[in-house]
Image (tube, helix red, strand yellow):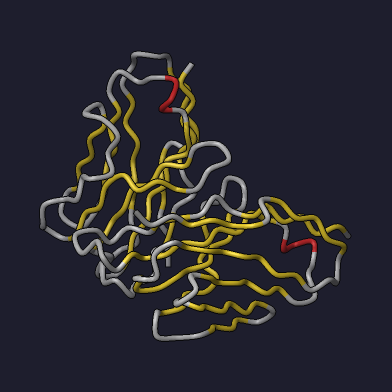
Amino acid sequence: GAGVSQSPSNKVTEKGKDVELRCDPISGHTALYWYRQRLGQGLEFLIYFQGNSAPDKSGLPSDRFSAERTGESVSTLTIQRTQQEDSAVYLCASSLSGSFTDTQYFGPGTRLTVL
Amino acid sequence: KQEVTQIPAALSVPEGENLVLNCSFTDSAIYNLQWFRQDPGKGLTSLLLIQSSQREQTSGRLNASLDKSSGRSTLYIAASQPGDSATYLCAVRPRGDTGRRALTFGSGTRLQVQP
């Protein structure tokens, strides 16, 4: 079946503009995660959605970052007033139930460049 | 706070060699440890997931071990091939952070297998 998809694959924006990144999880997966990967570094957790529960936003680096998810489908990550330090690859992952033992399946990522 | 370290940061070997990638983590309270492969523009592919109660997992030419008490894992790749060239990421699911299902990642080992 189809894996996790993300769009756009690349986004170049000017400092101060808002951007919206999209993630389509694997069908039937109730858990969805957003991570950020800066150049040469590991992935940093941003936010986690599980079904209709309140999201875990503890990884969001500032109030310029927000994310939404409609039910158990598409999620959007919005970055307002982008800064150069926001440049990174933004990765989305989904898992079947959010159980601690579940495997997370990752999308190809969106490479964001803030000029 | 859980920290994950991967050594070496980069590795270049001739085709056919057996090799070992190392991962260490500071807090042994984990649910599981996962090894991923990251190819440019293709996101992360899960290779092996070892639950905290397990000592190792094998898949084809790959073998991952886990020593939870010492905070270490190794990924062994037998008879390396040029197609194995990629960045290998190690990630743990911390046990103490019950509100979060996210993984904590290392910075990765960049592997190049020379033909």
Where, by quadrant of the figure, is residue A94 drawn? bottom left
Residue B101 in the image: above or below residue A68: below
For the N terminus of chain A, the quadrant is bottom left
Question: Which residue is depicted at the point 39% across and 70% down?
Answer: B28
Question: Which residue is at the front of the view, A86 or B42?
Answer: A86
Question: Which residue is depicted at the point 54% across and 56% down?
Answer: B5
> Could you tell me residue A14's position as x and y percent?
42, 14
> Could you tell me residue B97's position as x and y percent?
24, 61
Question: Which residue is depicted at the point 45% across and 48% down?
Answer: A43
Residue A110 in the image: above or below residue B7: above
Residue B27 in the image: above or below residue A18: below
> Could you tell me residue B10's position as x and y percent?
71, 51
Residue most toward the left? A53
Where, by quadrant of the figure, is residue A19 drawn? top left
> Could you tell me residue B15's position as x and y percent?
86, 66
Question: Which residue is at the front of the view, B32 or B112?
Answer: B32
Question: Which residue is depicted at the point 47% across and 38% down?
Answer: A89
Q: Is A53 left, or right, of B21 in this rendering? A: left
Residue most toward the front? B70
Total numbered labels: 0
Q: Is B112 left, or right, of B97 in this rendering? A: right
Where, by quadrant of the figure, is residue B57 drawn? bottom right
